Amino acid sequence: MKKISIYLILLATLALDSCNDWLSLTPEDSQTTDGYWKTKEEVEAVLGGGYTKLRDCVENMVAWGEVRGNSLTIGLYASTDLNNLNRWNILPTNSYCDWSSFYKVINQANMVIKYAPSVVDKDPSFNQGLMKSYVAEAYYLRALSYFYLVRNFKEVPLILEPYLNDEQNYNIPKSADSDIFKQIKSDLDTAIISTKEYFTEDWQTKGRATKWAVYATMADVYLWTGEYGKCIDACEAVMNSGRVGLIRGVIGTTNNWYTIFNPGNSNESIFEIQYSYGKSQSNAIVDWFYTAGKYTYTITPYMAFLFSQSIEDIRGSGNSYRLYYSWKYVGNAANSTSARTDYPNWIIYRMADIYLMEAEAYTLKEDANISTNYPKATELVNAIRLRANISSPLVTPSTEGELLSLIMDERAREFFSEGKRWYDLLRVTRLHNYGYKDYLINEILQSASAMYAPIIRATLINENSYYLPISSDELRLNTALVQNPYYANTK
């Protein structure tokens, strides 16, 4: 595509085998619908391309999910754009306002959804069941991508057809966030019907969309749309699956919790983006969090304080972080001092998330049965704390705000540097028509420097500032786009 980065088409021709070669994408610009979409392998290639392009989204997953929160701050080697994101000095020219990596995933998914059904009649080895499972994975990838986009930009173009040539209309206006969420839920509802419960290869069960990945994402989406009973049902589906579980925190004297991150693909994992060191499928995670001369992120004093609240917590110093580094994706083992040399997977969902999402849903559940729901929520949080080797259980709070704060603090400890903190704060803040705005401001200012705190406070008073501006490049190339309200007068 010559006109716009958001709809860049990159296809692949490679076969699916027992290892993750199919996630090694080699783009070939010459492929179009003419002469293509005739074999099962071609469908596999484009679907595999969607997962491969999801890797290209990880940098934004980290930056978008952490830099505006209060658990990670910017290291010495962060870019100017990342520093500005951290200081809430965000302009449409900032490179972290580029949404194109997610739209590339969406386009791969759109191609599979549109063209895969026609291949069944052309390739005898491609039956209806296999086709439906591939299309279900594509629906999941599209839903997940839009879920990231709507949380960061609020309103984005809703593209449901593949872009294959320059004759198509590129001037697509934004859709309302309510319409984006409606489409996300529709895609997940479609995906759940035909996604597999597991794959033959363990890495595929953790690295491709399964029913449990769909249910986990459903639960997350329902938290955002205030459908708390449905969130609980989705969480219970995962808990009762028999395919994934909360792993033991300590085995003997060994910190087993750390195995979630190294080697990864643990029984607790639901969905994680896969990398293979042996196949040169690389990422920069160790560089971002640790490597001298390259590290981008460091732990905030406030986050270190949260970990220090229990000396029993096996997630604390030496594990989630070491000195000022985020360590959970970096170290060779629990309490190690040497960094790993391979490439860690990036976890999107794991079982602890299910427990804590369900706790949040019980806190906010529609029937408001405080005497029943609040103890259930606290019990779920205590299960995570007990797994973290914290022997003293929490006492059930008496108010919604106190219980939400307790859950958010536990999520901060459990998911430190996993790209979730900003979304957790924003999700709570949006409740009751941004009724928790003061909570958000106070939390963000916990890690803000004295120099920038007054500016950040003034910015956060306006809830439109919680969403990123549309990139100036996209505005130039798509004349139907209108800048997000807070940035309407910026360039």
Image: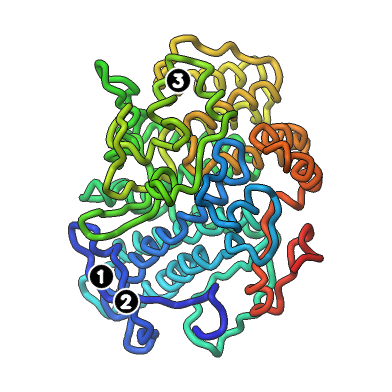
For the residue pair 475 and 435, the one nearer the viewer reads as 475
Residue 472 in the image: state x and y as whole percent: 67, 71
Residue 271 in the image: state x and y as whole percent: 38, 46
Tag on residue 383? 3
Q: What amino acid type should be assigned to the residue bearing mark 1?
A: Phe
Apparent side of residue 9 relative to residue 370 in the rendered image (left or right): left
Image point (56%, 64%), residue name: 99
Image point (38%, 29%), residue name: 319
Asked whether residue 342 appears in the rendered view, the answer is yes
Question: Is residue 353 placed above or below 393 in the rendered structure?
Answer: below
Q: Earlier in the sequence, mark 2 or mark 3?
A: 2
Nearer to us: label 2 or label 3: 3
Residue 196 in the image: state x and y as whole percent: 32, 51
Q: What amino acid type should be assigned to the residue bearing mark 3?
A: Ala
Image quarter of the C terminus: bottom right
Pointer 2 with pointer 3, Cβ within 8 A: no
Pointer 2 with pointer 1, Cβ within 8 A: yes
Tag on residue 126? 1
Task: Give the residue at mark 2.
Answer: 119
Image point (44%, 25%), residue name: 316
Name the outermost residue toward the left: 18
Q: What amino acid type should be assigned to the residue bearing mark 2?
A: Val
**Residue 269: quarter of image:** top left
Cα separation, mark 1 vs mark 3, equals 44 Å
At numbered mark 2, what does the secondary structure look like: helix, strand or loop?
helix
Image point (21%, 74%), residue name: 124
Estimate how packed mark 2 is, as few (under 14), some (14 to 19) or many (20 or more) residues with alpha carbons within 10 Å.
many
Q: Earlier in the sequence, mark 2 or mark 1?
A: 2
At numbered mark 1, what does the secondary structure look like: helix, strand or loop?
loop
